Amino acid sequence: MSRTRRLAALALLTAASLCVYLLEAQLPPLAPIPGIKLGLSNIFTLFTYVYLDPPAALALLLVRILLGCTLTGQVSAIAYSLSGGLLAFAVLALLRQCFAPGQLWILSVFSAMAHQVGQLAAAALILQSRAVFWYLPVMLLAAMAAGSLTGLAAQLVIKRLKADQRKKERKVDGR
């Protein structure tokens, strides 16, 4: 893929991720506990990680967090989102070699759990209280559900894209 096509793909994926983030911010909370949401924009991060590369996915993640929090008026949430997002990305990068490509959803679950741990760590630092970790069991259960959903969605998109590419290659080869 040429540099121009790669940059265009990254820009498009980032814009789509940001749009989904903004739409999700308009939905009512899933639970009365702050920090629990589906995280549908993470589908784009996972897809970018596999389809383009880890540096592109990290760029998408950082832009989405910074612009998303700014555009939704939640500037104070940047610290929570960055700590969670960066820890989730680190876990994704560390565990990527441990799982087969068809197991992206499992990586997503571990990533989502790390995201919650990162957010709670930021909250503990900001509030100067470890009491926030009492939320951890509930947050981890929510992360497992959301991580499964986003991981399966990204995995299905990647599988479909690969099947379409194989079909296109067969047409070009004349088969």
Image: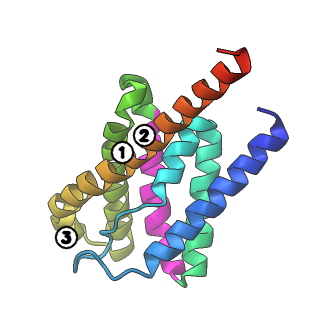
Looking at this view, is 77 or 166 the one in front? 166
> Is the magenta region chiefly helix, strand or loop?
helix
**Distance from Cα at disc 1 to Cα at disc 3:** 33 Å
Residue ID at (56%, 61%): 17
Left or right, 43 with reference to 169: left
Helix, strand or loop under label 1: helix
Residue ID at (57%, 72%): 68
Say which amino acid is labelled 2: Gln
Say which amino acid is labelled 3: Ala
Residue beneath disc 2: 155
Residues tagged 2 and 1 counted as in contact (Cβ below 8 A): yes
**Distance from Cα at disc 2 to Cα at disc 3:** 36 Å
Looking at this view, is 54 or 19 the one in front? 19
Q: Quadrant of residue 174?
A: top right
Q: Quadrant of the N terminus?
A: top right
Residue beneath disc 3: 131
Q: Nearer the viewer, mark 2 or mark 3?
A: 2
Looking at this view, is 156 or 14 the one in front? 156
Helix, strand or loop under label 2: helix
Start-end of magenta stretch: 74-93
Q: Residues within 10 Å of mark 1 (few under 14, many from 20)?
A: many
Q: Quadrant of the C terminus?
A: top right
Helix, strand or loop under label 3: helix
Residue 84 located within the stretch drawn in magenta:
yes
Residue 5 located within the stretch drawn in magenta:
no
Percent from the top left, x then y, of residue 63?
Answer: 64, 61
Q: Relative to residue 164, is residue 117 depicted above or below?
A: below
Residues tagged 2 and 3 counted as in contact (Cβ below 8 A): no
Q: Which mark is residue 152?
A: 1
Residue ID at (54%, 81%): 72
Residue ID at (82%, 38%): 3
**Distance from Cα at disc 2 to Cα at disc 1:** 5 Å
